[in-house]
Amino acid sequence: MRFVATCKLGLESTVGISLRKMGIESYETLDARVLFDGDFSDMARALLWLRTAERLLLTVGTFKATSFDELFEKTKALDWKPYLRPSNKIHVNGKSAKSTLFSVSDCQSIVKKAIVENLKSAYRTDTIPENGPEVIVEVGILKDEVTIALDCCGAGLSRRGYRTYNVAAPLSETLGAGMVMLSRFFPDTPLIDPMCGSGTIPIEAAMIANHIAPSRGRSFASENWQFLPKDVFQIAREQARDEEKHEKLLILGSDIDARCIDLCKKHAKKAGVMLQWKICDLKDFSTDWEKGVILCNPPYGERLLEQKEVNRLYHLMRQKFDQYPDWEKNIITARKDFEAVYGKKADKRRKLSNGGMTCTVYRYFAQREKTFAEKDASGGVSSDNEL
């Protein structure tokens, strides 16, 4: 079977790395999509383990369509019997970009009608009651190329289940994991997020370090598929539990807001990870750890603070972070003038998307490059050469 793992722009390489760690090789990488072949066991493992993917789709068919008639006939011609029964409730989602067929609601309606007609013929029946388990069908049209797929997830893969309380402008779980994977973080490396908010970055780092499947505590739409072997998810979850570690980690999340730290503790407990939390103003930032990784998502000046306040914050960040030259610094922001305000050019940049905003991760490497290069060569959580 052919699968599509969708992700935020800029995180495609991290999805590919996660798949390879599962023994799954992707055959094509596109903007915000990674394509791979596999069986139901691969699907279940991918759903549990993909840290930076937004969705996983099972492709039913692809074709070109520039008219509603063409969309109807080619959807109807696909083999739907292996996936659907007359009793299945069919829910169709859709999106279209740079295509002749731009009315998403019309495309959704036409695709559903085509599937219903196909099932009537395949099962030799005049009625499709749709009173059984729901199956979500995704229709995506890009430059007149149509992809019809089944949604394996239901709720997006960023919904890990541990973050039940939120602060203003939270970082998504998938983006938090992506930042960790793009950094030079290894399980034995200290990591600090000095503006941790709801705790996403430290928690995702702890889950990576302890090899905890990010989605092990949630359910998926594909578990209701009637054609799915019954023990696929049970086996995948048991294997994931067997691979978990529970080691002491040098990971610290701090924030000036006591309420945030209280939420972080609740989220970490729900995620099943143990790490350190601290109420701390950035002006009091300090650490006794010799070297490590600083990761943070400071306010952008878009929603939380006025730009002048944010500028002062960025100046303070530079002042405090420069006191630790042996540490890697990774800062995500939508501010295009960040380097000018921060007062230092980044060693490397990576464009990403956060809440619909185009952002950049600014990376400042440690002075002790050789130490991290040696770790890259020995194999860690992520390899900068791969990313």
Image: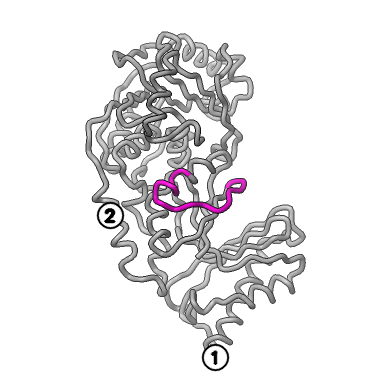
Say few, some or many: other residues with alpha carbon within 10 Å of mark 2 (under 14 / 14 to 19 / 20 or more).
few
Q: Which residues are magenta?
A: 17-32
The quadrant holding residue 99 is: bottom right
The answer to whether residue 168 shows anywhere in this view is no
Q: Circles 1 and 2: CB distance less than 8 Å?
A: no
Q: Position of residue 373 (x, y in %)?
A: 43, 23
Q: Which of the two residues, 327 or 374, is positioned nearer the viewer here?
A: 374
Q: Which of the two residues, 103 or 40, is positioned nearer the viewer here?
A: 40
Magenta-drawn stretch contains 19:
yes
Magenta-drawn stretch contains 308:
no
Q: Which of the two residues, 139 or 60, is positioned nearer the viewer here?
A: 60
Which residue matches tag 2? 239
Q: Residue at x 52, y 16 (%)?
A: 314
The image shows residue 239, relative to residue 18, as above or below, that is below
The image shows residue 218, relative to residue 289, as above or below, that is below
The image shows residue 32, relative to residue 72, as above or below, that is above
Q: Position of residue 256 (x, y in %)?
A: 37, 21
Who comes first in sequence, dot 1 or dot 2?
1
Q: Position of residue 349 (x, y in %)?
A: 57, 26
| Kind of residue at disc 1 | Arg
The quadrant holding residue 196 is: top left
Which residue matches tag 1? 124
Locate residue 255 relative to residue 60 in the image: left or right: left
Q: Residue at x 42, y 28 (%)?
A: 184
The quadrant holding residue 145 is: bottom right
The answer to whether residue 338 shows anywhere in this view is yes
Q: Which of the two residues, 261 or 86, is positioned nearer the viewer here?
A: 86
- The kind of secondary structure element at disc 2 is helix
| Kind of residue at disc 2 | Gln
